[in-house]
Image (cartoon, grey):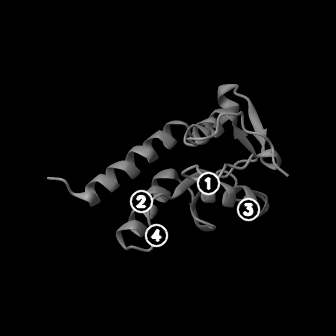
Amino acid sequence: MNDPHLALVKEVHRNAIEQQHSAMPAESLNEKTIPYTELPSLPLDCEYHHEWNTYRRNVARLLANGLEGTWVLVKGDNILAAFPAWKTAYLAGLAMIAEKEIRHPFLLHQVRSNESASRLEEYRRQCPNLHLPLAKTA
């Protein structure tokens, strides 16, 4: 049976699992990090362009409000909510899709003062026409 709703749930689940696997704090992996003040934007053809750039614009406020370490649910130009755990944020996103409050895709991202360079590389790989390294934007 070719149920489009089931296919959507499976796709969202697969994306979320991939994000969860890369959710380990970069500091614990001795990995290169980028300060939140230097986060690059993503081009328009990237799947998470709006959501990522919304996060970038709001990360300073989120940190100032003591939300470091929480998971934010971002859709388009809106940060919909912050959650203490990835799983809670993921389930809330699925519930919003089921209730037709939002459409796929949405972004779940952990608020951090220093971002893992490999996580940024994951977002970059989703940009079909981006062939250059991500650069800091004004």
- Say the numbered circle drawn on residue 102: 4
Q: Position of residue 113 (x, y in %)?
A: 76, 47
Q: Which of the 4 image quadrants contains residue 29?
A: top right
Distance Cα–Cα, label 4 vs label 2: 13 Å
The residue tagged 3 is 58
Circle nearer the viewer, 4 or 2: 4
Q: Earlier in the sequence, mark 4 or mark 1?
A: 1
Circle 2 residues within 10 Å: few <14, some 14–19, many ≥20: few
Label 1 vs 3, first from the N-terminus: 1
Residue at (54%, 55%) from the top-left corner? 107
Marks 4 and 2 close (CB-CB < 8 Å): no
Residue farthest toward the top in the current orientation of the protein: 30
Q: Position of residue 4 (x, y in %)?
A: 26, 58
Q: Amino acid at mark 2?
A: Leu
Question: Which residue is depicted at the point 40% across and 66% down?
Answer: 97
Q: Residue at x 32, y 49 (%)?
A: 10
Q: Residue farthest to the front?
A: 129
Q: Is residue 114 left or right of residue 6?
A: right
Asked whether, in this view, residue 37 is left or right of residue 127, the answer is: right
The percent position of residue 28, horizontal first and vertical second, equals: 66, 30
* Contact check, label 1 and label 2, Cβ < 8 Å: no
Marked residue nearer the N-terminal end (3 or 4): 3
Give the alpha-carbon distance from disc 4 to disc 1, as whole Å. 16 Å
The amino acid sitting under disc 4 is: Ile
Q: Which residue is mark 2?
A: 91
